Image (tube, grey):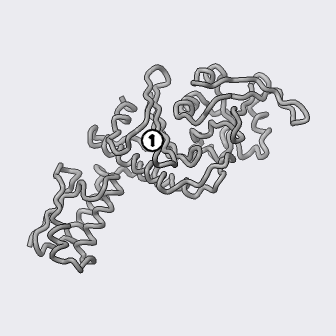
Amino acid sequence: MEATVKNPFKSNYSIYEEIDTSFSKKFPHELKDPRRLALEEAHELEQKVLGTEPHKRIKVVVFENSSLKQVLDYYVSDLREDDSTYSPQIEKAIENSKFILDLPEKWDDEGSLNYLEETWRTATQFVRKTAFQFKKETGRWIDAPKITPSHDGSIDVRWKSLERSLLINFPADSISPANFFGSDKNIDTIKGTLNLSSQNHWLLKWLTR
Amino acid sequence: MRVHKSFLDSEGDLFPTAFRNQPKGSIGMSVDWSEYAEPIDTKNRANKPDENAVIKFTAGNARNIPNQIVEHKPVSPPEIPNQAHSEVIGDKKDVEVRERFMQIYEMEIPLINSI
């Protein structure tokens, strides 16, 4: 009996699919098996923390008859407390921004529509994912941005450093791209649209340059 | 310029969307020219002054923002007269426009409960 789970944030393992393939074949009707539940919890947490799709980062090597729940329980608690993968300051900013979802229509006297949870998730996942990518590359967390309601159901994310600032607008229309503008108040500016499926932490590197 | 508390966060900072043309569909953002009004006058012109902060920026800095024009447009009777009334005309939905306003404004009279 043996099981190992590697913390993907401390190493660069690629995905192993044994858990879904071999396990499902062996126990097709036992979907509530503790091992499956534990893995689902780990994947959910991974998605929340990193904004990545499940299964992309977690390496799970499962040997027959292993006590996966025990291992994954350890993994999950380790991930929650590990400040190398989790910024309390950014999580607090995201939590505080939930008020956006409760704003009534026309809160701005301009007939603004209700804010969609999808828009909020897009914006906050971007914040988590980009901050984590920045942390991985630089070894430090960036300060939390301000996440605020904007026009026409869109959401603004604004980051500031000592010298520069960056505003990103996430439109309510999920087809339209997010727009950004950054400036040092002088001549150094950046402006454009973002492909949210790509890595965009270069924005934060520019911000803190 | 007067800013309702709806556009201020718990630290007293403005939301970028505080810089907007209003009412909806209009082409400009209402401000008062300091030549003709003190900040407290601007605050007191609100329906509920205690729910409003007052910020300032110079007309020159506003004109340096892309596609923004500043015009003095005094309000005369039969509306409530306001010699200071001016407008910053131009689209405010562009991220660059709102971010540049964020960079040039200064808080003049903060919201009381955000101090």
Res B113 seen here: no
Q: Position of residue A75 (x, y in %)?
A: 23, 62
Splitting the image into 4 quarters, where does residue A209 fall? top left
Q: Position of residue A132 (x, y in %)?
A: 32, 46
Res A12 seen here: yes
> What chain does badge 1 belong to?
A
Would you say A11 lies left or right of A84 here?
A: left
Q: Report the residue at 57% width, 24% height from top.
A: B66
Would you say A78 lies left or right of B90 here?
A: left
- Tell me the kind of residue under disc 1: Pro
Of the 4 image quadrants, the one containing the N terminus of chain A is bottom left
Question: On the image, numbered disc 1 is attached to which residue?
Answer: A177
Q: Position of residue A16 (x, y in %)?
A: 16, 59
Of residues A2 and A193, the one nearer the viewer is: A193
Q: Report the residue at 23% width, 80% height from top.
A: A29
Q: Report the residue at 62% width, 32% height from top.
A: B91
